[in-house]
Image (spheres, rainbow, N blue to C red):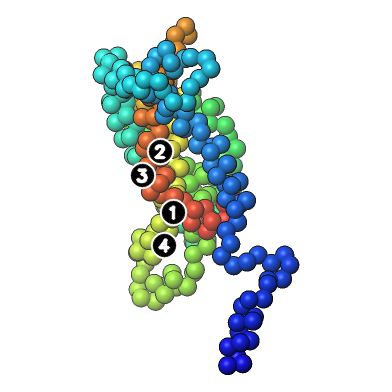
């Protein structure tokens, strides 16, 4: 009886000054997070809302957040117009970005594993040269890459926007950092079981590196998906264009259709949002374990 009374007294005693009661939600923190979230997603909301406005309302000043008369006119215009094959551009971008991401992950993994786990003469020099290419502005490579693509007869084909960026110095650096974080004991155990280097790479390293591989694939996909300058140089036919340069034809110097631009932006952002939602968990884990912070 005395023990129960002491327990009740202790439970009823007020908490010390400055100590937060358990179970009490940090309201101020949630308010700040919600406010920041609204700041970052408000452009996306405005883009989506504007895509359902009429042509006159989309360019009205001051702008309105809620359309007075919601309409699908902008989507019908860009999806069914003869001069803007948006579905074809969307498919071209999807094929190019997916193929480029697969090539980047494959080449980067094959190059990063020897640099992380194998000892050979000149390894540090090779890695230093690869990292040094990160300091080269990509824009100065446009002319050499254009000449190479032209000699290979790849101009005006999707191969021209897939292959030239298949070797990624950042991908090699990123995966090398992740491979270094994996326990060496796992490979030693595989060697005792009779596995060779290729088997260790395929059956031990790659399955454990899924977060880093998914992260690199998502980053490569987004880079190729959002690329504008290079496709403009190497793709000429309207049916071979990718989505980003194709959508730029929706505006001219003297006439800007904001409703069409916002509708095209919504279509272009859908794969990015879906991809990030599915890969968010892998991206966070891959970045945290690789030692890279942004």
Residue at screen point 43% across, 69% down:
187
Q: Which of 145 and 15 is in front in this view?
A: 15
N-terminal-most mark, 3 or 1: 3
Please say whether residue 107 is visible from this viewpoint: no
**4 or 1: mark nearer the eye:** 1
Residue on which disc 4 sits: 208
N-terminal-most mark, 4 or 1: 4
Residue at screen point 41% across, 40% down:
273
Residue on which disc 3 sits: 102
Residue on which disc 2 sits: 272
Q: Which class describes the residues within 10 Å of circle 2: few (<14), some (14-19), or many (20+)?
A: some
- 245 is higher (above) or lower (below) than 215: above
Question: Marks 1/2: CA distance?
Answer: 15 Å
Report whether 28 appears left or right of 192.
right
N-terminal-most mark, 2 or 3: 3
Q: Nearer the viewer, residue 165 or 285?
A: 285
Residue at screen point 63% across, 86% down:
6
Q: Which of 92 and 182 is in front in this view?
A: 92
- The disc at residue 282 is 1
Question: Marks 3/4: CA distance?
Answer: 18 Å
**2 or 3: mark nearer the eye:** 2
Asked whether the beta carbons under mark 1 and mark 2 sit within 8 Å of each other, the answer is no
Q: Residue furthest right?
A: 17
| Secondary structure category for the residue under label 3 | helix
| Secondary structure category for the residue under label 4 | helix
């Amino acid at each position: 009886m005395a023990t129960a009374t002491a327990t009740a007294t202790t439970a009823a005693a007020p908490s010390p000054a400055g100590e937060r009661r358990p179970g009490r939600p940090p309201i101020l923190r949630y308010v700040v997070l919600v406010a920041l979230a609204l700041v970052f997603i408000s452009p996306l909301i405005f883009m989506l809302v504007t895509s359902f406005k009429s042509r006159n309302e989309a360019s009205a000043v001051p702008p309105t957040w809620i359309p007075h008369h919601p309409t699908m006119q902008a989507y019908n215009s860009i999806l069914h117009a003869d001069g803007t094959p948006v579905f074809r551009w969307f498919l071209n971008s999807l094929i190019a970005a997916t193929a480029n991401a697969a090539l980047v992950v494959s080449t980067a993994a094959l190059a990063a594993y020897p640099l992380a786990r194998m000892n050979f003469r000149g390894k540090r020099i090779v890695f230093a040269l690869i990292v040094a290419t990160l300091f080269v502005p990509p824009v100065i490579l446009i002319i050499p890459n254009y000449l190479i693509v032209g000699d290979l007869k790849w101009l005006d084909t999707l191969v021209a926007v897939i292959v030239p960026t298949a070797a990624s110095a950042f991908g090699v650096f990123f995966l090398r950092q992740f491979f270094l974080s994996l326990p060496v004991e796992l490979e030693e155990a595989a060697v005792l079981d009779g596995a060779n280097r290729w088997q260790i790479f395929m059956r031990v390293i790659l399955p454990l590196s899924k977060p880093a591989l998914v992260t690199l694939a998502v980053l490569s996909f987004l880079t190729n998906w959002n690329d504008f300058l290079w496709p403009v140089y190497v793709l000429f036919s309207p049916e071979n264009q990718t989505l980003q340069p194709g959508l730029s034809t929706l505006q001219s110097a003297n006439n800007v259709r904001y409703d069409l631009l916002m509708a095209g932006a919504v279509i272009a952002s859908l794969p990015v949002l879906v991809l990030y939602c599915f890969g968010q968990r892998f991206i966070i884990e891959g970045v945290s374990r690789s030692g890279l912070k942004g």
